[in-house]
């Protein structure tokens, strides 16, 4: 539900609230580490509770902002609505696309575990390094550009759509090419 709320807010140009929301997980982890660990027989469970608390906190934090723009969704159960069937059909390819990445990661870890000691760690750290520019800049650019592209597509404004896409592509290249070169330089020192 939290990603749905974030997507709605992003589509209406409200980027700050969805950007701040993930920090609630960190606040919850730190708070539960101090407040719950002393009272638990198994201190690790405090972190599990922290994740659960953060999930609810992130959702309830965004709901008032949805209410302000009159977009607080009211749950309705209408399985016969044509939109439900359409979403089911669209979810299958998306689910496949997301699961391919996870399956690939599992296979990579399995293969790395058959190699020398430390291979899984090397794979993990290299993946973190590779995803640093993507997670820092690529996702932020996509979050900002996607609502604009959707609006331009809905308005059938082809020229503005192409212009926005070109701007986003240039910005990604401006960031990705130096980041790739920096990662290659880091690699050359090892």
Image (spheres, rainbow, N blue to C red):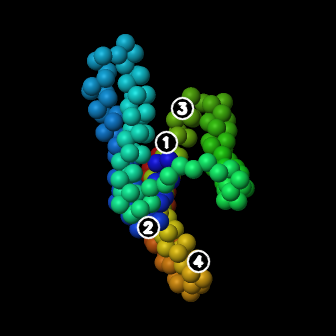
Tell me the tag on residue 12. 2
Asked which secondary structure carries label 4, the reply is helix
Q: Earlier in the sequence, mark 3 or mark 2?
A: 2
Position of 70 with respect to 119 (left or right) is left
Q: Which residue is mark 4?
A: 153
Looking at the image, tell me whether mark 2 or mark 1 is earlier in sequence order. Answer: 2
On the picture, is 62 further left or further right than 190?
Answer: left
C-alpha gap between disc 3 and disc 1: 11 Å
Q: Position of residue 6 (x, y in %)?
A: 45, 55
Q: Looking at the picture, how far across and down is residue 34, in whole percent?
A: 26, 27
Task: Quickly name the residue at label 3.
Answer: 118
Mark 4 surroundings within 10 Å by alpha-carbon count, few (fewer than 14), some (14 through 19), many (20 or more): some
Q: Which residue is pictured at 34% across the width and 43% down the height?
A: 24
In contact (CB < 8 Å): disc 1 and disc 4: no
Q: Residue at x 35, y 53 (%)?
A: 64
CA gap, disc 3 and disc 2? 46 Å
User: Which numbered disc covers residue 125?
Assistant: 1
Q: Nearer the viewer, mark 2 or mark 4?
A: 2
């Amino acid at each position: 539900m939290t990603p749905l709320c974030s997507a709605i807010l992003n589509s209406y140009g409200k980027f700050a609230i969805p950007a701040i929301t993930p920090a609630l997980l960190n606040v919850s982890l730190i708070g539960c580490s101090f407040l719950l660990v002393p009272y638990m027989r198994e201190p690790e469970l405090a972190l599990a509770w922290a994740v659960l608390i953060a999930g609810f906190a992130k959702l309830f934090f965004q709901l008032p902002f949805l209410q302000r723009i009159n977009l607080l969704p009211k749950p309705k159960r209408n399985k016969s609505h044509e939109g439900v069937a359409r979403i089911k059909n669209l979810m299958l390819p998306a689910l496949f696309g997301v699961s391919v990445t996870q399956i690939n990661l599992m296979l990579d870890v399995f293969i790395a575990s058959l190699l020398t000691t430390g291979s899984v760690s090397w794979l993990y750290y290299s993946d973190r390094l590779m995803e640093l520019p993507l997670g820092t800049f690529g996702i932020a650019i996509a979050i900002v550009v996607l609502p604009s592209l959707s609006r331009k597509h809905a308005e059938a404004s082809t020229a503005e759509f192409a212009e926005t896409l070109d701007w986003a592509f240039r910005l990604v290249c401006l960031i990705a090419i130096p980041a790739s070169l920096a990662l290659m330089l880091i690699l050359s020192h090892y």
